Amino acid sequence: MKTIKLNDMTIYVAKNYDEMSQKGAEIIAELLKAKPDAALGLATGGTPVGMYKELIEMNKKGEISFKEVSSYNLDEYYPIEKTNDQSYDYFMRDNLFNHVDIDINNTHIPNGMAADCAAEGKAYDELVRATGGVDIQVLGIGGNGHIGFNEPCDVFDPITHQVTLDERTIRDNARFFNSIEEVPTQAITMGIGTIMTAKSILLLASGKGKAPIVKEMLLGKVTPQVPASILQFHKDVKIVLDEEAAAELLSEIE
Ligand code: PGA
């Protein structure tokens, strides 16, 4: 697989979505073999689904175990009940937790029904801080450069907080709903500061729709208008792209 070093970042260019998913799963499996009680920062969205499928297979074959793992998800819609099949709580159970040997009590997702979002954010940050920083934070990237639900804005948000979703995010996520009107307009997300406490970062991106923002994140200036650009300042970042998502980056640097 083509591998590119860019400052402290390692970029892997996989042929397609399946190879990207496999590479992402290998990186997590390697961590779990070295540290069975790892703290995983997890993400939702279309991108990591294939990686979760690979991890489920590895777990079924006995190659990896989640018995001692704890997990901390990036974000949740607000307000939304855990039982709603559009909640990220439901997504994680459906796409990973129900199919591996993780103890569900060790999985954490911001509470989409919190009465007080500021208090929820503070408590969530304390939980994450107690891990000493998650060992690896899985990220996707929004077409607008968001990570978690940190939308483009004037400042990097340090802490877990309530957000109003960008119009672009609502449009992008409408594909998971019956209509755009059903997409929640609010969410609770780990802040950029929370994300940056992760010991390592694994960002996945697939498809040509992500090609412009991938280039911008890695080669553009670091700005809260492209929240993912902050990753240029993290010391241990792995980016796994498929060829389509890598296309604009590669045409710039090669
Ligand atoms: P996607 O979302 O994986 O569904 O493209 C990524 C994101 O919004 O972070």
Image: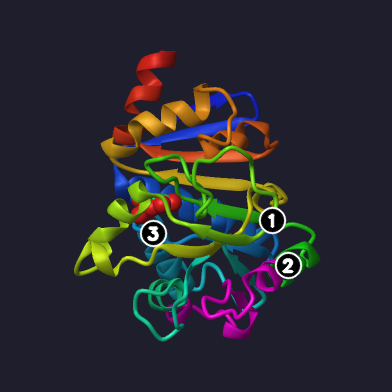
- Residue 122 has which mark? 2
Q: Residues within 10 Å of mark 3 (few under 14, many from 20)?
A: some
| Residue carrying label 1 | 159
Question: Mark 2 near mark 1, Cβ–Cβ under 8 Å?
Answer: yes
Q: Residues within 10 Å of mark 2 (few under 14, many from 20)?
A: some
- Residue 203 percent across, percent down from the top left: 50, 45
User: Taking 240 as reference, is 72 left or right?
Assistant: right
**Which span of residues is magenta-colored?**
97-121
The quadrant in which residue 111 appears is: bottom right
Quick one: 33 or 213, which is closer to the camera? 213
Amino acid on which disc 1 is placed = Ile
Q: Which residue is drawn at 20% across and 66% down?
A: 179
Q: Which residue position holds label 3?
A: 45
Of helix, strand and loop, which one carries label 1? loop
- The residues tagged by marks 1 and 3 sit, at their Cα atoms, a distance apart of 21 Å
| Place of residue 253 in the rendered image (x, y in percent of width and height, measured from the top left) | 44, 15
Q: Residues within 10 Å of mark 1 (few under 14, many from 20)?
A: some
Q: Which of 219 and 246 is in front in this view?
A: 219
Q: Whole-Å distance between the Cαs marked 2 and 3?
A: 24 Å
CB atoms of marks 2 and 3 within 8 Å: no
| Three-letter amino acid code at the position of disc 2 | Lys
Q: What element carries label 3?
A: loop
Q: Can residue 180 be seen in this view?
A: yes
Above or below — where is 237 with respect to 166?
above
Q: Is residue 1 visible?
A: no
Of residues 65 and 253, the one nearer the viewer is 253
